[in-house]
Amino acid sequence: MTDITVVESIAANANDVFKILGDFGRIKVGGAITAFEIEGDGVGAVRTITTGGGKVIERLDEYDTEKLVFGYSILNEDNPLPVSNYSARVEITADDETTCTVNWSGSFEPKGADEATASKVVRGIYTGGIAGTRRALGC
């Protein structure tokens, strides 16, 4: 298994960051994403993200609004990402009232690519998600 962790600070309240980053249904159609749907609510919800390369089907495995933690896994091995047996966990920790730290970690087995390439893709997803949260919060 390959493990990737991205840790970044965000100049925003931890609860506000969790409301954005932890919203499992927040993905919008646009750019590489050509369709999005979600089934269910809370732990066990399944979202399908469609891109030009195929579908990524993810399940929300953990969600705790008090601990500001959520976890998810990819269900379909035929997903277009260079990973299999993928799971991830995001933990947001308040540094103070106006700053927090996001710790986004995942594990997977590289699929159809070497470990360095797969790791770069996963790291890009994490840093992109954090950057999108910053934009959404204006920070």
Image (cartoon, rainbow, N blue to C red):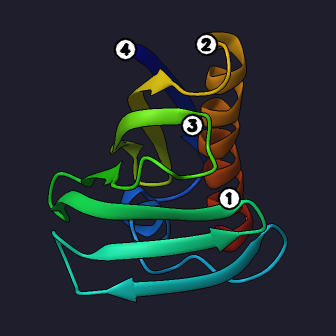
Q: Earlier in the sequence, mark 3 or mark 4?
A: 4
**Image quadrant occupied by the N terminus:** top left
Label 1 and label 4: CA atoms lie apart by: 30 Å
- Other residues around mark 3 within 10 Å, as few (<14) / some (14–19) / many (≥20): some
Mark 4 sits on what residue?
A: 1
Q: Earlier in the sequence, mark 2 or mark 3?
A: 3
Q: Earlier in the sequence, mark 2 or mark 1?
A: 2
- Other residues around mark 4 within 10 Å, as few (<14) / some (14–19) / many (≥20): few
Mark 2 sits on what residue?
A: 115
Q: Amino acid at mark 4?
A: Met
The image shows residue 16 at horizontal and vertical percentages of 44, 68
Label 2 and label 1: CA atoms lie apart by: 29 Å
Q: Nearer the viewer, mark 2 or mark 3?
A: 2
- Other residues around mark 1 within 10 Å, as few (<14) / some (14–19) / many (≥20): some
Mark 1 sits on what residue?
A: 134
- Other residues around mark 2 within 10 Å, as few (<14) / some (14–19) / many (≥20): some
